[in-house]
Amino acid sequence: MRASGTFTVAEFIPAPVPESDIGTATGVGFATMRKEFRGEVAGRSSTLFTAAYDQAAGVGTYVAMESFTGTLGGAEGTFNFAHAATTLGVGRNDEYFAVVPGSGTGALAGITGTGSIVVDEDGTHRIHFDYELPE
């Protein structure tokens, strides 16, 4: 099955990162986010977001873990999903996106799958899940 939607970041809160004795050319940051979803993917999520990103060059990589509550293709429940991507200034490369096995509840219990995030030129964030639910 496939479900698609759009989302907005309703809240982005940078958090302190423990100091490290390893210095790199691109600093590592951490934040929590709250997102709101509309469409066949409808609900909200809480996100743990880590990135090593050079703001001036637009180059870096992020890794995120989200806890979602809402509906996916009309089925209501919760689940976790993880995603990551790299940008070299334009577009997204080396994408990873997976539903966390065993994390679903309610009508989404047993969910498995993958998906992707696309950012349109106008800044619209789109998400889709290719998923399966047990029969």
Image: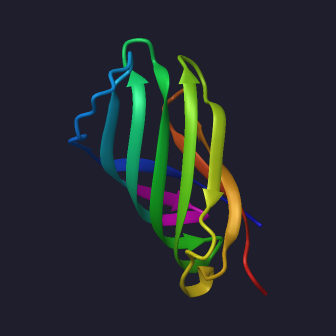
Counting labels gives 0
Region of the chain picked out in magenta, as a range: 35-43
Asked whether residue 69 appears in the rendered view, the answer is: yes
Residue at the front extreme of this rendering: 21
> Which image quadrant is residue 128 in?
bottom right
Find out whether residue 42 is within the magenta segment.
yes
| Residue 30 vertical position relative to residue 55 in the rendered view, above or below | below
Quadrant (top left, top right, bottom left, bottom right) of the N terminus: bottom right
Q: Residue at x 46, y 58 (%)?
A: 66
Residue 119 point in image, percent of width and height: 56, 35
Q: Main secondary structure of the magenta part?
A: strand
Find out whether residue 135 is within the magenta segment.
no
> Which image quadrant is residue 102 in?
bottom right
Residue 52 point in image, percent of width and height: 41, 29
Q: Nearer the viewer, residue 101 or 87?
A: 101
Q: Nearer the viewer, residue 6 or 87?
A: 87
Residue 112 point in image, percent of width and height: 69, 69
Q: Residue at x 59, y 50 (%)?
A: 127
| Residue 127 vertical position relative to residue 54 in the rendered view, above or below | below
Q: Residue at x 28, y 28 (%)?
A: 21
> Which image quadrant is residue 94 in?
top right
